[in-house]
Image: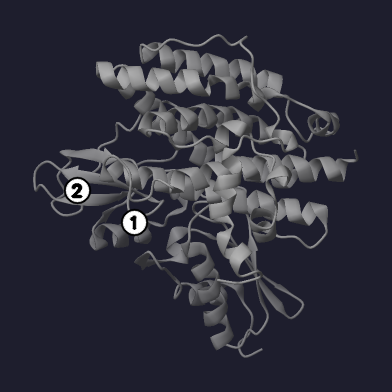
Amino acid sequence: MPIVFHTSNIYKILEEVKDPEVPVISIIDLGIVRDVALVEDSLHISITPTYSGCPAMKEIEEDIKSVLHEIGFDKVKIITVLSPAWTTDWLSKEGREKLRAYGIAPPVGTSVDKSALFAEPKKISCPQCSSENTKMISQFGSTSCKALYSCEDCKEPFDYFKCI
Amino acid sequence: MNTQEALFKYCCRIGDNSLVLGHRLSEWCGHGPILEEDIAMINIALDQLGQAKTILAYAGEVEGKGRNEDSLAFLRTEREFSNAILTEQPNGHFGTTIARQFFMDVFNYYFYHDLHFSKNETLADFAEKSLKEVTYHMRHTSEWMIRLGDGTEDSHEKIQEAIDDLWMFTGELFKMDEVDEVLIAEGIAIDLNKIKGQWSAKVHEILTEATLSIPDENMWMQEGGKQGSHSEHLGFLLAEMQSMQRTYPNMEW
């Protein structure tokens, strides 16, 4: 084993793995890495999917293996954990800022009770001009994790990283 | 029937519902009435396929015969599929698709809500994850039911017709057999009679707001999908979905 094993080292290395669909944020920013453990000579990385059908998960798994192989971990096992289910509350503060800078409005507030029908009354600010005079075009966007909004002031459409 | 056999079948029923419904929705890709709705239906299809993948993979593990989610999806015949007949009904017009999806979303919402308390940890975790997704699916289709029902004369008529046509397939969702009984005794499966009341109340609430009339719940209901007796539509659906594996056996992506 090339480096002294310490989980914080591994978390640091995993910051190199980006979300293939939003390449400015890492899987650590996303909060999908749930655990890192050394079991005998094999490194076990537990991750949780953002959405059940997210096609990026497969690529993320491959990327994790690849960065860890590079530093000498030949045996890497990816474990998928479904509970507790991923929530946008786990998105790091830095991750939120990176999203905004990239042109995607970060999730607003916490993902508390979503059972109320038709409720999306939050003010989403436009990542281009910061105006809060925005409206939702569709709760479904270019990927599972985004909704489509548009700004009534600068007239630009934008993606909103929706809260779940 | 022992617990293992029942659990395999139970997982297949859940997975097949998601898989078949997800496939039906995916048929809309590029054909949606407006771009946003095209994207919405495909997003929902993706969630359903993801759910199907998770639970069918587990079904394969439970069965213990070396089958995985792909072999269960692509190498089974019609009679081995155990989805509810409602899910395989053709897309029809946009209103038919929305009505079918709405009935299933409301069902899944309450179903996963309860399955979350299953004594089987994998099912409970799967339900917790799926519930989040189904919640916004239900919100979306409920909005459409109201918009179409309380919309124009034409949209009202079409969505009412879709409800009336699909109604006889809704009863099957709550039918239980030996699979359910074996697993309920173990605290693994949930009692569908309880879900029925919740489903009914929510459907009444939305249809009433949509100014639509609710068909008779005591009318004759078509059933059999869970046991493998399907409408003719499933065969055509599988012919398309499984065509690659049938043409090039054992091919890998």
* Disc 2: CA contacts within 10 A as few (<14), some (14-19) or many (>=20): many
Question: Mark 1: which amino acid?
Answer: Arg
SS state under label 1: helix
Subunit ID for the residue under disc 2: A
Above or below B200: residue B85 = below
Q: Is residue B177 visible?
A: yes
Subunit ID for the residue under disc 1: A
Above or below B140: residue A10 = below
Q: Is residue B228 left or right of residue B187?
A: left
Return the residue at label 1. A96
Q: Residue B207: which quarter of the image?
A: top left
Q: Residue B167: which quarter of the image?
A: top right
* Cα distance between the residues tagged 2 and 1: 14 Å
Return the residue at label 2. A126
Residue at 68% from the left image edge and 26% from the top image edge: B223
Q: Nearer the viewer, mark 2 or mark 1?
A: 2
Q: Is residue B175 left or right of residue B216?
A: right
Q: In the rendered structure, which disc, 2 or 1, sits on the residue that comes first in sequence?
A: 1
Residue at 60% from the left image edge and 38% from the top image edge: B232
Q: Quadrant of the C terminus of chain B?
A: bottom right
Q: Is residue B129 visible?
A: no
Question: Mark 2: which amino acid?
Answer: Cys
Residue at 34% from the left image edge and 17% from the top image edge: B157
Q: Nearer the viewer, residue B20 or A7?
A: B20
